[in-house]
Image (cartoon, helix red, strand yellow):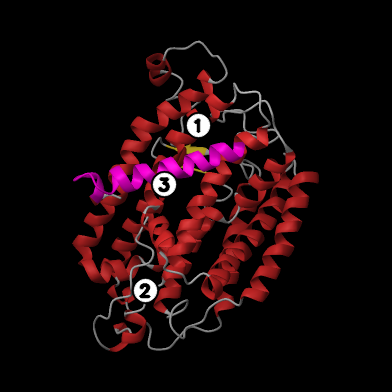
Amino acid sequence: MTNAGEAIPELGTGSDAVPAAVAKRRLYYLDNVRAVAVLAVVLLHTSICYMVAAPKWWYVVDPDVSTVFTVIVLIVDVPVMSAMFLVAGYFAIPSRRRRGPGGFVKEKLIRLGAPWVFGAVVLAPALTYLSYVSRGVPMPYLQFWATDFWGPMYQQSVYWFLGVLLALFLLLAVALRVDPALGERPAVPAAAPWRAVLVVFAVGAVAAAAVSPFFGLDDWHSVGWVFVIQPARVALYPAFFVLGIHAERQGWLAGDGWRPAPGAWVTAAAVTGIGYLAFRISGYSAAVPARMMGGVLFAAFCVSGVLAAVAGFSRWGERSTRMWRILADNAFGIYYVHPLVLYPGAWLLAGFSIPGALKAVILLAVTIALSLAISAGILRRAPILRRMF
């Protein structure tokens, strides 16, 4: 993840220049969008442990399930990752301007490449093994690692995000090499922002419909053991990343530039969210038409949900208190380590005779607290790790 709240640097002249008032103003609300998105990921993964009809491969599933957690999963799962791709895209070109072509690539390889490889090769197998341990499957870990993990159980846990994001940054670096003008602010601003938003929706909806005969909204697929993606959703991630790049080049979301209106986008998110939730609960099936309709509703709710979050934080979330700064600074670390706390914790709590809702609250609170402590106390302090986190 990029440093989402980095100020936009005042560089160059002409179309590449940024007004000093904008350059000096740190976009705290985008910092906070990213921090809350990461906390929402922790909430999502906690809720899956207690939802009805959790994925069969999920690491730990508590016997005490509830439809409340199913609703949380269905709602939170839609916009959360796309919001992080949008924020990453918004600060991609400013980072490249500041570091230069070589420094930009080096920084991304250190901050994303190294954690991705370690997470995918070392941490993901251990986390996936919990799906066997929690179900009493008698297979030694080394046997699991050498056989099932590299076969039907292969995944990258939460670390898939780092690989996809790194690929987008590297593609951007190549594009800027080929056409440096892509990194400059255009002399003539783009037309109405709604056109760019409509393109993102169209890309997501059409891509989901195109793969619907083969993949459902929740299906995962490994691309040569390198990338792990959800095919029905994957087009939205580069679309939001590019939207973030486009927004920064147009001067949107900062200073006097265009910002989404909270009233309109919160309303749109509520309407599309209710429609999507109702369809998933009552109408979604393995049939291709249902998958196509689900993809369209998913894209609509995703776009409106992300812009509603940006709009709301832009209006009411421009805060730089100590707690917000701590959460923003440690967002990457929390994202990276929370599975190491959450899934073993869910396994331990499964043995206690207390309500599932109480288990979920305890698990969520402990996971956030311990992940924050590990990030702030270890990842951001250790000599080598602090370069990554």
Q: What is the spatial separation of the Cα atoms under label 1 and label 2, in whole angstroms?
A: 36 Å
- Name the amino acid type tagged 1: Tyr
Height in image: 311 above or below 108? below
**Element type at mark 2:** loop
What residue would you read off at disc 3?
334
Quadrant of the snapshot with the N terminus:
bottom left
Q: Locate residue 263, reporting x and y percent.
A: 67, 75
Q: Are marks 1 and 3 in contact (CB under 8 Å)?
A: no
Residue 379 belongs to magenta span: yes
Is residue 219 in view?
no
Q: Locate residue 22, reporting x and y percent.
A: 36, 82
Left/right placement of residue 63 relative to residue 183 reads: right
Q: Residue at x 51, y 18 (%)?
A: 133
Q: Which residues are magenta?
A: 360-386
- Name the amino acid type tagged 2: Arg
What residue would you read off at disc 1?
343
**Nearer the observer, 104 or 257:** 257
Residue 186 belongs to magenta span: no
**Nearer the observer, 36 or 231:** 36
Crowd class of label 2 (few under 14; some 14 to 19; many from 20; radius 10 Å):
some
Q: Are marks 1 and 2 in contact (CB under 8 Å)?
A: no
Left/right placement of residue 209 relative to residue 200 reads: right
- Name the amino acid type tagged 3: Ile
First along the sequence among labels 1 and 3: 3
Crowd class of label 3 (few under 14; some 14 to 19; many from 20; radius 10 Å):
many
Say which mark, if any, is on residue 26: 2
Based on the displayed image, in which of its 4 quarters is residue 125 positioned? top left
